[in-house]
Image (tube, grey):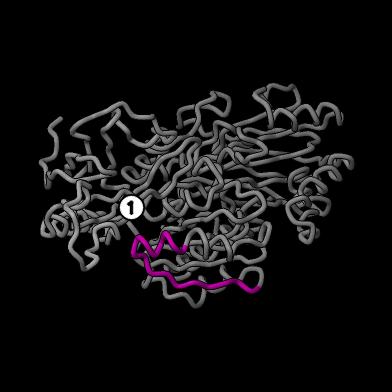
Amino acid sequence: MEKPPRLLSSHLLLKNRVYEVTLNRALMVWKELQTKKKRVSGSIHNSLKVGRYCVPVSEILAVRETVDSRTKDHGRWQKMSQKPTEAYPYTFTVSYVERMRRHRWRCNDVTFYCADYTVCQQWVQTIRDQLSTLTRRPKHLLVYINPYGGKQQGKRIYEEKVAPLFSRASISTYVIVTEHANHARDHLKMDADLKKYDGVVCIGGDGMFSEIVHGLISRTQKDSGVDQNCTDEKLVPCGIRVGIIPAGSTDCICYATVGINDPVTSALHIIVGDSQPLDVCSVHHNNTFLKYSVSLLGYGFYGDVLTDSERKRWMGPVRYDFSGLKMFLTHNYYEGTVSFLPATDVSGTPRDKTMCRAGCSTCQHSGQLCSEDSQDCDDISNSENGSDWQIIRGKFLAINAASMSCACPRSPKGLSPAAHLADGTTDLIVVRKCSRINFLRHLLRHTSKDDQFDLSFVEVHRVRKFRFTTRNCDRLFGRICNDHPCSCNLSTATGTAMARSCPTPTSKWECTAS
């Protein structure tokens, strides 16, 4: 493969050593001319070898001219100094992404010393010119801060960790601190002038992200004349991406997409314009739209835990432990019928242990399938009344639909470790009635390396659509649609598949991001 031509090459000073610094359209590289034995850094950034460092241009955040106090003239005759910086009086600083261990990113600065002011200016301007060609990067962001979520640290996290990074990257922001539940959703649906912004960022947890998703998708469908209550309507894609800065109780969506719950890491992903597709599951009942879900749609045990925990928000994150123990001891089960349409046109199964990672071929193939050949999507829709549906009847402790792994620090693998982020399917997990001991075995396997599906009372299926009908209740309808987001994170919805389900008087469908 032919290397890109060099744009600049100079001998510059760095930490009192002379380096050959080169820049092309893809990389900035600095190599020490007289390499000595060096201590290996704890970073896992793109260090090619000792004394040679490489940074992708796409991960350079900013460049600026700087003034080094050591080079200032003190206004008196001085003996000629042997310090190398005396011969290199002009400086510029490059801020870039440094990749640490366990998916953590940090902003690092490197300052180069130049012998000539013209050379210094040339480097600054050329790097800025290259950054201006990165069109995926946001320039104007609408930011919502939830001051009440998680440990109520959202505002502090933004002001101390995120805002300085946005400022350094020359990103302008309009910040709204939410005052009540659904404030962000309602503002996006009715008042926000989205044409002014390249993306929407929420500082909060999964619930805050859900508000943004509901507001944007609902606004887009309304502007496009799409009836959300009609299960056969094809949703129109959103034209704006969504980023999430973790500041909630669980931060499941951030953990599952970025690999870590770290505000700085998420902010850097947003700055460089990273984008990760997501699937969105829509839920209907009697031709009435209820909600969207991007992570877990739970009925039975998980639905009851989330419903009960909402009444105890004053307890903070510990409310999930309390409600989980309470529902485990209650041990409710629900009788009904689950019918589903298997996803036979995708590669992989919920138990193949193939993790969804950046550049996932399964998700890319699924996106191309529906973007390049709409007939395949029509075939999926037309199969609703066909004979491909499968049925499960019985008594159930839990019925869950996982549109992503639902990984979090407490469950590093998640509820469905092999679930894909953007393949247009959801993993339907059915837990039949069993003893408390057996159900506890199933729950504990979420925190270990054991297969949580390798139990006789647990079934898992990769599906396009599903319905749940209780013994005394009508069916509830829904669908799954692809959602394409910012840095993360960032989102845009495009309908491809479906999910169906139904609430009863004794339990309730709940989502971790609904």
Q: In what element is the residue under mark 1?
A: strand
Horizontally, is 308 left or right of 75 in the view? Answer: right
Q: Residue at the location (65% across, 47% down)?
A: 297
- Quarter of the image for residue 466 reads top right
Which one is nearer the viewer's eye here, 140 or 301?
A: 140
**The furthest residue to the bottom:** 191
Look at the picture and state if 222 lies above or below 468. Answer: below
* Residue 506 percent location from the top left of the image: 83, 51
State which quarter of the image contains the N terminus.
Answer: top left
Residue labelled with disc 1: 95
* Residue 283 percent location from the top left of the image: 61, 53
Look at the picture and state if 193 lies above or below 141. Answer: below
The segment highlighted magenta reads: 163-179
Which one is nearer the viewer's eye here, 84 or 177?
A: 84
- The reply to whether the magenta stretch includes residue 272 is no
* Residue 258 percent location from the top left of the image: 49, 44
Q: Residue at the location (42% across, 45% down)?
A: 378
Q: Residue at the location (45% across, 54% down)?
A: 267
Q: Residue at the location (89% across, 40% down)?
A: 329
